[in-house]
Image (cartoon, grey):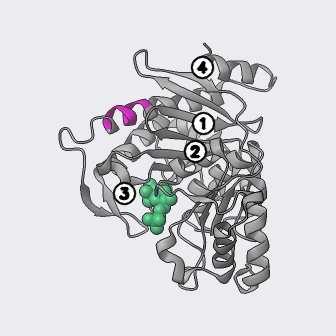
Amino acid sequence: MKTLIEFINEEQAHNPNATGEFSRLLNDITIAAKIVNREINKAGLGDIMGYEGKQNVQGEDQKKLDVFANDMFIEALKHGGQCCAIASEEDEGLITFNNKLSNNGKYVVAMDPLDGSSNIEVNVSIGTIFSIFKRISEPGKPGTVDDLLQAGNQLVAAGYIIYGSSTMLVYSTGHGVNGFTLDPSVGLFLMSHPKMKIPEGGNIYSINEANYIYFPDGVKEYLRYCQEDDPKTNRPYTTRYIGSLVADFHRNLIRGGIYLYPGTRKNPDGKLRLLYENVPVAFLAEQAGGKASDGFRRILDIQPNEIHQRTPFFVGSKHMVEKAEYFMRYYSKEFEPKK
Ligand code: AHG
Ligand code: MN
Ligand code: MN
């Protein structure tokens, strides 16, 4: 049985420049994850469910667990001292720390502390998503917004924690994707899914079809394709939609499938946030042999202008994403972002 710590140390041993700081950063993330996991497991007991009574910068009502998870990850990263700035879904501005250790930290983190929060009360899987970049500003001072505004192709690492029927950490440092399951009896993440690969094709599509009338024609045509009768290509496919990106992606990663959150005429950028939802999930998809795009462009090549920026999102099995892109190019050219 390999523990996460053993695996991180092994991976870092191949890197002659490694100072141990990255390992500590990842370790801090897992400490917060275990605390959040403990709290999630108690949802229903005590006063942890329901709304905080405030809205976040995106105008979404914050749940108590959104705020709790946000505080835990910030605390862990602050005390660790490797991270000089955080962008979080739950905070409008950049989070920096007024201490020397953190100001000398090499890394910045973008995070969605609790993804799928509408599923907390109903005992359905939720997650945490994170992106890790190296800072570009000089150390010695707090990190800056520019440190966070890096394209996904600059990522040092990204991953998610899924709080599901078991709790897993799935992450990549750019050398493939590995999954670790939390053994709650000993409180350790143990390697359970080495070298994860997403099937090149699949028969699951995941989309909130209630928005159908607003979808671009390219998405409507792609859905029609998914629903056509063609036993040779395994169609009609099947729909699975949980409403937690982490959980929908995790299932599709293992089984093969596509997740779509397109833009619409009203919201051309869709709903999901580039830096802490789309980029980290896109990175994992590519590292597992899959693909991620906004319908036209590779997600990891998009230069962000704003920490809470949104983009349309198509992610999953390579052949399925390519097919959806084909329909977007053919039927929805007007949605293509201007160069
Ligand atoms: P969050 O809970 O972090 O706000 O994210 C919710 C996101 C994502 O996880 C999910 O796939 C999507 O919103 C669901 O949106 P719809 O309810 O519009 O389908
Ligand atoms: Mn989310
Ligand atoms: Mn969230």
Q: Earlier in the sequence, mark 4 or mark 2?
A: 4
Give the residue at mark 1. Answer: 170
Q: Residue at image x 50%, y 67%? A: 208
Q: Residues within 10 Å of mark 3 (few under 14, many from 20)?
A: some
Q: Which mark is residue 118?
A: 3
Q: Residue at image x 42%, y 30%? A: 34
Q: Secondary structure at mark 4?
A: helix
- Residue 262, position as x, y percentages in the image: 60, 71
Would you say the beta carbon of the disc 3 residue lies within 8 angstroms of ligand 1?
A: yes
Q: Is residue 287 above or below residue 17?
A: below
Q: Is residue 284 above or below residue 305?
A: above
Label count reads 4
Q: CA distance from mark 2 to mark 3?
A: 18 Å
Residue 295 left/right relative to 169: right
Residue type, label 4: Ile
Which quarter of the rendering shows the N terminus? top right
Q: Residues within 10 Å of mark 2 (few under 14, many from 20)?
A: many
Give the residue at mark 4. Answer: 5
- Assess whether residue 162 is covered by the magenta stretch: no
Q: Which mark is residue 250?
A: 2
Cβ atoms under marks 2 and 1 closer than 8 Å: yes
Q: Is residue 62 above or below residue 31?
A: below
Marks 2, 1: nearer the viewer: 2
